[in-house]
């Protein structure tokens, strides 16, 4: 019989708050640095190309670790892995704020991204399993408060901190929240009972290598392709080829290995497959706009970091108000997901 992780009363509230804090830490840090890049560049003596790696390094750390999260949670226990990820994220947030060179900041951001990668995925799983089946649509709406508000909360928060304090404090604010989240996780979050752990000889090291090659090269190409004139640059061309080969051999390896690091067979579930595709599409509009708009308003229009950040406040407030309502509606009318996605895409196209 499968272990039930459903919680009730104050314990479920505490677990929900903990998971949302962790999701916010991860997502806010994806966008909070966008409005502080100009200050970082001047303070660290970096070029525009170099300072862009502050965002790229974090994203690469994320995309490498996220597909491995399920396997790592099975090896170390979900609670232990989740708590360790929060600790790594918190420690390297402190180190990012104390970086004295652009090279240090890039390295610390990469490791911070590795720690943060587990927070988003695991938070969703923890919240979902803490609620009974009939209330999971509402649970996902609550989780969505962190996922959707996070990217829009980052720029105004980062702008305020940058203009009124200094850019290291956009990392320091993670420290008290990280400590609180770690203590609450160790005290209240439970781990499901997993099957026997993999022995070292059974670990899919080759799959891990192909995954890192695939997503690492792809992330670089997507981040730097426009800047380097795409395939007119030899580095972009070479990394594109490496990414394609890494992706091909990764899929092949995970399809034939007895203990894959990423079980691609789960995509055989139609609901999961469609949900993954829809989330992928949603990410383009959500994260793309939160990156481009601050750069445009500051570089072209001459806005301050605070002004650029405040542009996102109406969207964040509207989302916070609507998420519980939408969650209740989806329990009765699941097909509304498709309608809302098309509305989102239509409005993004209009804004563009």
Image (tube, rainbow, N blue to C red):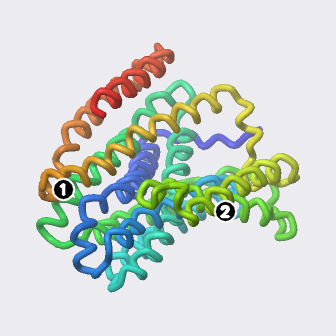
Above or below — where is 55 with respect to 301?
Answer: below
Return the disc, 1 or 2, that comes first in the chain's sequence.
2
Q: What residue is drawn where x is 38% and y is 65%?
A: 52
- The residue beneath circle 1 is 298
Nearer-the-camera pick, 185 or 309: 309
Nearer-the-camera pick, 332 or 51: 51
Residue 289 visible to an observer of this rendering:
yes
Which residue is the extreme one toward the bottom?
A: 100
Which residue is the extreme one toward the front?
A: 232
Q: What residue is drawn where x is 66% and y is 52%?
A: 70
Answer left or right for 178 relative to 110.
Answer: left
Above or below — where is 103 with respect to 137?
Answer: below
Answer left or right for 320 relative to 64.
Answer: left
Q: Quadrant of the C terminus?
A: top left
Horizontal and vertical percent for residue 207? 76, 59
At mark 1, the secondary structure is helix
Answer left or right for 44 relative to 7.
Answer: left
- The residue beneath circle 2 is 213
Q: What residue is drawn where x is 40% and y is 43%?
A: 147
Horizontal and vertical percent for residue 1? 77, 38
Disc 1/disc 2 C-alpha distance (Å)? 34 Å
Residue 79 visible to an observer of this rendering:
no
Above or below — where is 234 with respect to 307?
Answer: below
């Amino acid at each position: 019989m499968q272990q039930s992780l459903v919680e009730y009363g104050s314990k479920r509230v505490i677990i929900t708050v903990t998971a949302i804090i962790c999701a916010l830490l991860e997502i806010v840090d994806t966008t909070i640095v966008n409005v502080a890049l100009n200050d970082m560049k001047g303070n660290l003596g970096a070029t525009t190309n170099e300072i862009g790696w502050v965002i790229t390094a974090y994203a690469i750390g994320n995309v490498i670790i996220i597909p491995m999260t399920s396997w790592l949670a099975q090896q170390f226990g979900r609670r232990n892995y989740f708590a360790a990820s929060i600790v790594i994220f918190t420690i390297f947030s402190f180190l990012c704020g104390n970086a004295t060179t652009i090279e240090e900041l890039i390295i610390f951001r990469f490791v911070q991204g590795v720690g943060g990668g587990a927070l988003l995925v695991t938070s969703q799983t923890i919240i979902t399993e803490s609620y009974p089946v009939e209330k999971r649509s509402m649970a996902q709406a609550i989780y969505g408060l962190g996922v959707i508000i996070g990217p829009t909360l980052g720029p105004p928060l980062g702008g305020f901190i940058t203009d009124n304090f200094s850019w290291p404090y956009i990392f320091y604010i993670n420290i008290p929240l990280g400590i609180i989240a770690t203590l609450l996780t160790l005290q209240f979050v439970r781990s499901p009972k997993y099957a026997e752990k993999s022995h070292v000889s059974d670990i899919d090291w080759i799959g891990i290598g192909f995954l890192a090659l695939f997503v690492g090269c792809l992330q670089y190409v997507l981040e730097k392709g426009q800047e380097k004139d795409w395939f007119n640059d030899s580095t972009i061309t070479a990394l594109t080829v490496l990414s394609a080969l890494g992706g091909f051999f990764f899929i092949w390896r995970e399809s034939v290995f007895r203990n894959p690091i990423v079980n691609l067979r789960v995509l055989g579930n139609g609901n999961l497959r469609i949900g993954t595709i829809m989330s992928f599409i949603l990410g383009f509009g959500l994260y793309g706009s939160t990156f481009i708009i601050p750069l445009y308003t500051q570089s072209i229009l001459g806005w301050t970091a605070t002004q650029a950040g405040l542009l996102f406040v109406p969207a964040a407030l509207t989302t916070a108000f609507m998420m519980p309502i939408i969650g209740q509606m989806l329990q009765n009318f699941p097909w509304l997901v498709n309608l809302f996605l098309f509305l989102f895409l239509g409005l993004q196209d209009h804004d563009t």
